[in-house]
Amino acid sequence: RWIKAYGVAAPATKVPMTADMHTRIGSLTKPFVVTKILQLAEQDKLSLDDPIAKYVDGMPNGDTATLRMLADMTSGVPSYTLDEAWVKKFLADPAQIWTPDQLIEVAAKLPASFAAGEKFEYSNTNTVLLGLVIEKVTGQSAEQAITDTVLKPLDMTSTTWPGSSTALPKPFPQGFTLQSPKATSTKPVNSTHWNPSWEWTAGALVSTADDLLRGARGIATGQGVLSAASQEARLR
């Protein structure tokens, strides 16, 4: 039955999923990045109404898309994942390492999706740009800045940034995807060790269910990481 369903041999030992297993959490990374942006606004180190052009040149809507719009996905800055040539290149070699500058370079060649603030459109480029803003304002890597002032205060001790490493802390489950030219409807591809650098601050974090429970409480209430005013701004 396993082979019929998945096209691969069943694992020798079947281990149930547990709350301490490490998994790639993808876009659940984004709220933690935005929390750091809100902290920097609290400290008057940036304004949510700063245009992204103040920090990063050459982006569509650069002079009109604000950090607030990047954070709430109304910037009109297109996602690099909309570029079909990039997607084809990524899926052909999921082991490739991507830098944040390479990712935003792809987006910079695309037209704006709409005038800044006019509509909502989910875009990974928005949160990659916010990661670059964090680095320019703090002088730290985005990973270190977010770890020190967001993840640690929320006691997310099992949550880590992989960088360009494909390794996962143990224990971890296997991941499979149909989003590969080598996959079929009955034979998914093992994507456990695809390189996470293509997401960076838009989705590279590794965490556990236990850690995410603690993190979700902090994101939902702001307790331990944000003032009441900043949390209200987030909810708006």
Image: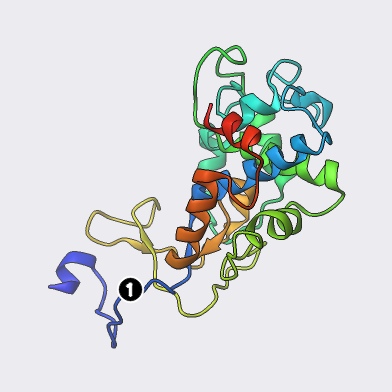
Q: Is residue 127 left or right of residue 47?
A: left
Task: Name above or below for residue 171 compared with residue 71.
Answer: below
Q: Nearer the viewer, residue 18 or 161?
A: 18
Please give the name of the residue rendered at 58% of the width and 64% of the height, measured from the top-left corner: 156
Answer left or right for 158 relative to 181: right
Q: Residue furthest bottom?
A: 12
Residue 98 is situated, as x and y percent measured from the top left of the image, at 67, 52
How many neighbours does mark 1 have within 10 angstroms: few (below 14), some (14-19), or many (20 or more)?
few
Amino acid under label 1?
A: Met
| Residue drawn at the location 70% of the way across and 23% of the way down | 66
Left or right placement of residue 84 versus residue 102 in this view: left
Q: How many marks?
A: 1
Q: Which residue is mark 1?
A: 17
For residue 91, say whether it is visible.
no
> Is residue 27 among the parts visible in the rendering?
yes
Where residue 63 sits in the image (x, y, percent)?
Answer: 76, 17
Q: Is label 1 in a helix, a strand or a loop?
A: loop
The picture places residue 86, in percent across and down from the top left corner, at 57, 40
**Residue 122: x percent and y percent?**
50, 31
Q: Residue at x 83, y 26 (%)?
A: 54
Q: Is residue 63 above or below residue 141?
A: above
Q: Quarter of the image containing the N terminus?
A: bottom left
